[in-house]
Structure formats: C-alpha cells, structure tokens
Amino acid sequence: MYREGLLVVISGPSGAGKGTLLNLLRDLGGDSIRFSVSATTRKPRKGEVDGVNYFFKTKEEFKLMIENDELFEWVEYCDNFYGTPKKYVEDSVKEGYDCFLEIEVEGAAKVMKAYPECVSVFILPPSFEELRRRIEKRGTEDVEVVNKRLDRAREEIAYASNYDYIIVNDDLKDAVENLRCIIRAEKLKSGRNREFLHQFQQA
Ligand code: 5GP
C-alpha cells in the first residue's frame, strides 16, 4: 500500500489553535510524522529555540537560501521572510514520513500548485466571537490590535475554500481525531495506490 509519506499543508488564522492541535498530534502521532521547521527573518520570541521553532536567519542569509534554491516556498509576511526548507520536506516524504507544514495562505497556495498531491487542511475557530475571545486571552487588551488581528483572520478565512478539508477547532480532541481520519483516508485513496493495485493484478 501507499509507501511515500504525505505532504500535509496546514493553515488557519492566528487564534484558531493550529499550534496546540499539531502539538497534540505530535504527541499521539508516533514515529511516522515529521514537522517542517521553517526559516524566518523575524526575531525569536521568548522561549523560541533556533532549529526547533524556526531557523532564525538574517535577511542576507535568507536571500542566499532563495538564490541557492533551498526553499520549497517562501513569502514576505508582516515585513519578514518565511520559507520552507526544501530538502527536509522532500527527504521526509520520500522516506515515508508524513510531513506537516504549518504555513500561511499565500505559501500554501504555492505548495498546492507545485505539489498537487499534497493534502491541504484549513483550521477554523468555532466562530468569530470565540476567535476574539482567544485573541484577547493571549494577552493584548488593545482593542485596535485585536480588531486588526480579526480583520486579518477574515482575510485568511476567505481562502479556506481552496483547501481540501476544513476542521473546526472547537473541541481539541475531536479536531485532532478529524485530522488523523483525514490522513488515514488520504492514504487509502485508489489514486495513491495505483502501483500497489498494478502489482496486485500482476501477481
Ligand atoms: P509567526 O511569526 O506568528 O510564527 O508566523 C506568522 C505566519 O507565518 C503564520 O501564519 C505561520 O503559519 C506562517 N509561516 C511560518 N512558517 C512559514 C513558512 O515557511 N512559509 C509560509 N508561507 N508561512 C509560514
């Protein structure tokens, strides 16, 4: 049956709970999944570790990665560059790991075009009211900042219909279970198992 790993693209607005969802998946997922670590020119936040959360790069270093064709996709987002290192993703998939990319909508569209066999999943919050609550809970009380993030979320959610699947992250456990079901079902698609079917028929 299907031997190559899946390339799974995950997007969703800030506050949808992508990080928590993927962390739980990581805990449950065993040895068969990997998470791509992006390169970025933004400064590390408190607690972030180079090589774990991101590969933190200078603009010059990042530009060199682009020139050397080391990135699978890259975008400029909020005055910083973000990109997915190519080799890790390609090697992981070839070796049979399911490789998860948590990226924003523009980069995701590039991946979907370049690698149509990828599986794309958009994570939604249960509602805008809940999203507002989650953003406020994250610490900022500045109404303007909260509204700006909600506006951005609206813009990003407009892209949700381009994705193969949507998951509403209301109950975290249900959301993870839905994601795992998607992965399992994708691997059973006849289109991904043509070689197996062919061998089966020849035997
Ligand atoms: P943050 O700065 O909050 O960590 O990330 C900002 C946005 O950039 C998030 O939506 C995140 O998913 C996205 N992002 C992180 N790494 C990449 C990447 O390699 N490529 C793209 N296109 N987006 C990324």
Image (cartoon, rainbow, N blue to C red):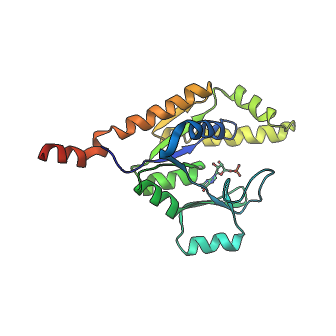
Q: Is residue 194 left or right of residue 102?
A: left
Q: Quadrant of the C terminus?
A: top left
Q: Nearer the viewer, residue 168 or 157?
A: 168
x and y percentages locating residue 91 in the rendered image: 45, 60
Q: Residue at x 57, y 75 (%)?
A: 67
Residue 32 image offset from top left, x and y in percent: 47, 45
- Name the spot of residue 14 as percent of width and height, x first: 69, 41
Where is residue 104? Give x, y as percent. Answer: 60, 49
**Residue 143 located left or right of residue 28:** right
Q: Is residue 29 left or right of residue 64?
A: left
At 52% from the left and 71% from the top, the residue drawn is 69
Report which quarter residue 188 is drawn in.
top left
Residue drawn at 32 percent across, 39 percent down: 189
Instruction: Identify which residue is drawn at 62% across, 24% down.
Output: 171
- The answer to whether 169 is drawn above or below residue 3 in the figure is above
Q: Nearer the viewer, residue 150 or 99?
A: 99
Residue at the farthest right position? 142
Outermost residue toward the left in this view? 202
Locate the N terminus and report the quarter of the image it occupies.
top left
Q: Is residue 66 above or below residue 39?
A: below
